[in-house]
Amino acid sequence: MHGTATARAGANIALVKYWGKRDPVLNLPATGSLSMTLDGLGTTTTVSFDDALARDEVVLEGQRATGAFRERVSRFLDFVRQEAGISAHARISTRNSVPTAAGLASSASGFAALALAATRAAGLDADLGRLARLARRGSGSAPRSLLGGFVELPAGIEDDGTDCVPVELAPPDAWDVALVVALAAIGPKEVGSTEGMERTRQTSPFYPVWLARAPSDLRDAREAVADRDLERLGRVAEASCFAMHGAMLGCAPPLLYWTGATVEAVRRVRTLRHDGVPGFVTIDAGPHVKVLCAASVAATFARELARVPGIESVLVERPGPGAEIVE
Ligand code: PMV
């Protein structure tokens, strides 16, 4: 068996967040989420199955990977091998367009690219349902990176997750918006998303509140995308983000992903908005701040955020395409 394929996927940033699982084994989300796929930040991965290999060989940014990262990729390939009825190991080479260490949504683009490349290399028919099911085993937010533009991932109600398949709400070129990504210096080591979600479910008194508001946030955001209503989408994105972080802060012990630079960047965006430049923040399980705004004012946010002490670099991202085979 010697199949090989290369795929690329863009990172995605959730505007209505996913934080909590309804099935930890199948990695099914407790709530639906809505995101924008990015055009610049992403992952390119090549998978080559080879009967001669004694184990999977994983190369990240040109360096042989060992330990937890190699294990995570190898375990993921086991799902693909099982579905394809093959036993061959593979050589997997993967590159991110931002350093993995910057902690910026590389797992979503990573597992979307890996799911597409591995199924193609294994000779499997890669329909969206199968890709979503596989990508999700790697990371809950990864199915959203399979599609481009604005994407909804419904929570679904089926036990097997067959109704948890992403839907494209607007293609990449349908809306002239940007996400300005302000990269803050990484603080102390953060709790990973799986552990953080479990702690929130088990200990945060705000978790039920968070779950209860998600459907209306999702409906609001879906309508805002359909109407290309940036103000409405931005307001609901901020509400979803701060509700998620509120639930995190309610944990025992509390989960605090922000640094001083995070807070200062949020304040800078509010000041600009007050001064008539509309932009809306969202923050994931880390210190970076992303600003949703019209493409026409992205340069203003980029310039202002770069001045915030503790912000190390700023990127302007536009809506990008879904995962695709390259080569
Ligand atoms: O897919 P995971 O396990 O990395 O979790 C993603 C969690 C958030 O980024 C905080 C929210 C989201 O919906 O992307």
Image (cartoon, rainbow, N blue to C red):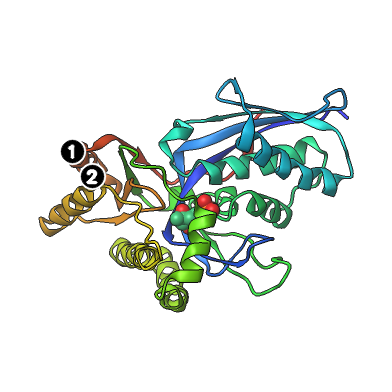
Across and down, in percent, residue 227 comes to 38, 67
Q: Which mark is residue 261?
A: 2
Q: Which mark is residue 220?
A: none
Across and down, in percent, residue 105 comes to 47, 44
Across and down, in percent, residue 250 comes to 36, 68
Query: Going 21% across and 41% down the picture, which residue do you hit?
Result: 305
Query: Going 85% across and 45% down the picture, which residue do you hit?
Result: 84
Q: Nearer the viewer, residue 296 or 119?
A: 119
Q: Mark 1, residues whose alpha carbon is within 10 Å: few (<14), some, or many (≥20)?
A: some
Quarter in which the N terminus is drawn: top right
Q: Decide if residue 217 is in sight here.
A: yes
Asked if labels 2 and 1 touch by Cβ distance under 8 angstroms, the answer is yes
Farthest-out residue, front: 253
Q: Is residue 248 above or below residue 62?
A: below
Q: Which mark is residue 309?
A: 1
Label 1 to label 2: alpha-carbon separation: 6 Å
Q: Decide if residue 7 is in sight here.
A: no
Q: Mark 2, residues whose alpha carbon is within 10 Å: few (<14), some, or many (≥20)?
A: many
Q: Is residue 21 above or below residue 191?
A: below
Q: Secondary structure at mark 2?
A: helix
Q: Is residue 312 above or below residue 82?
A: above
Q: Amino acid at mark 1?
A: Pro
Across and down, in percent, residue 143 comes to 60, 53
Decide if ligand 1 comes within 8 Å of the CB at mark 1.
Answer: no
Q: Amino acid at mark 2?
A: Ala
Q: Is residue 54 above or below residue 242?
A: above
Query: Going 46% across and 70% down the picture, which residue do you hit?
Result: 203
Quarter in which the C terminus is drawn: top right
Q: Secondary structure at mark 1?
A: loop
**270 with respect to 37 (left or right):** left
Query: Going 65% across and 75% down the picture, which residue do you hit?
Result: 157
